[in-house]
Image: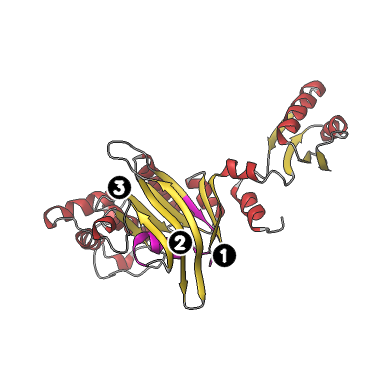
């Protein structure tokens, strides 16, 4: 079953456009099979990420088109909403409650029976590394602890789909690494997880499956390397750090696929219109010349480069 399916979905607020004609599907969770995973929703602030998240969560109704979750409208179908866990970007919470009390209340609101809600809340907090702090009041929590508590409220009722809107905003590096590890573990366990962020390295740390959204429209989707291949009409950069970069220049200077060569004392950067051919010739030059290579890679095989290409941002 498809977890999320949007067909020509648009949402506007008066004269302000949230998203425009979004058509997109993502794999769902098939009973008995672990088919979940993490998908990154990537875009700058104001791109339409939160609007799309709220449509998926059933908090908004499309102005035009349709968006379904597990085959039904999340806005109209209560049972579908109970299969969704959602963490909004904002920080509002009942600060006077303990973490356990807060997550228990949210589990009850999501449909968990009263007899099981407290145990489910404790298990969710434990999964988020909050066991030692579950009896403390939320008002005294650090940013990282608050984010982990929010994640616990999203998973306590056992949803099949998790919608996490900017879950790493403002947390320190240690807490960020711990939260990333826990989100990835949930995806590996079979949950379908949509994580939105405008921070490239956060999405890159979570998944290579991305949806790029800009000005309310989906520009690209899929594996970051597949997307990169779609835009290979742009020169592809390859950077080599070695003991004799001029030897590489001499070996490849006449190659017709190269559009630019940059060199300094320790490295050479090649811009090529045919990456596969360039890598083959580069390997031959290194072996024939007996060069000592310290590093070899492409500055373009990352989310930053992909996003810049797709949105037309100058490098």
Question: Disc number at residue 9?
Answer: 2
Residue 249: image x %, image y %? 85, 35
Which of marks 1 and 3 precedes in the sequence? 3
Residue 235: image x %, image y %? 74, 45
Which of marks 1 and 2 precedes in the sequence? 2
Residue ID at (34%, 70%):
92
Cα–Cα gap, marks 3 and 2:
35 Å
Cα–Cα gap, marks 3 and 1:
36 Å
Q: Residue furthest left?
A: 115
**SS state under label 3:** helix
**SS state under label 2:** strand
Of circles 2 and 1, the one toward us is: 2
Q: Is residue 210 magenta?
A: no
Disc 3 packing (10 Å; few <14; some 14–19; many ≥20): some
Q: Is residue 54 magenta?
A: yes
> Circle 1 sits on which residue?
215
> Circle 3 sits on which residue?
127
Span colored in magenta: 40-60
Image quarter in which the C terminus is found: bottom right
Disc 1 packing (10 Å; few <14; some 14–19; many ≥20): some
């Amino acid at each position: 079953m498809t977890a999320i399916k949007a067909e020509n979905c648009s949402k506007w607020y008066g004269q302000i456009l949230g998203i425009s004609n979004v058509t997109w599907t993502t794999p769902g969770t098939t009973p008995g099979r672990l088919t979940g995973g993490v998908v990154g929703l990537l875009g700058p602030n104001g791109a339409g990420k939160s609007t799309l998240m709220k449509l998926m969560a059933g908090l908004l109704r499309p102005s035009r088109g349709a968006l379904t979750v597990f085959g039904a409208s999340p806005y109209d179908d209560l049972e579908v909403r109970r299969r969704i866990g959602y963490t909004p970007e904002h920080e509002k919470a009942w600060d006077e409650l303990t973490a356990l009390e807060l997550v228990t209340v949210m589990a009850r609101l999501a449909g968990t029976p009263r007899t099981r809600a407290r145990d489910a809340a404790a298990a969710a907090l434990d999964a988020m590394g909050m066991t030692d702090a579950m009896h403390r009041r939320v008002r005294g929590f650090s940013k990282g602890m608050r984010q982990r508590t929010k994640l616990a409220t999203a998973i306590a009722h056992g949803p099949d789909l998790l919608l996490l809107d900017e879950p790493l905003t403002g947390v320190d590096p240690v807490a960020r690494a711990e939260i990333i590890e826990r989100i990835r573990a949930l995806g590996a366990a079979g949950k379908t997880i949509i994580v939105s962020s405008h921070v490239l390295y956060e999405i890159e740390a979570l998944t290579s499956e991305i949806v790029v959204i800009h000005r309310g429209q989906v520009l690209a989707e899929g594996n970051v390397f597949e997307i990169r291949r779609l835009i290979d009409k742009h020169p592809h950069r390859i950077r080599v750090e070695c003991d004799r970069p001029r030897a590489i220049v001499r070996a490849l200077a006449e190659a017709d696929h190269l559009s630019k060569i940059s060199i300094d004392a320790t490295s050479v950067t090649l811009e090529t219109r045919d990456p596969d051919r360039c890598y083959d010739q580069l390997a031959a030059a290194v072996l024939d010349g007996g060069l000592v290579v310290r590093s070899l890679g492409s500055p373009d095989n990352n989310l930053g480069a992909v996003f810049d290409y797709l949105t037309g941002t100058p490098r």
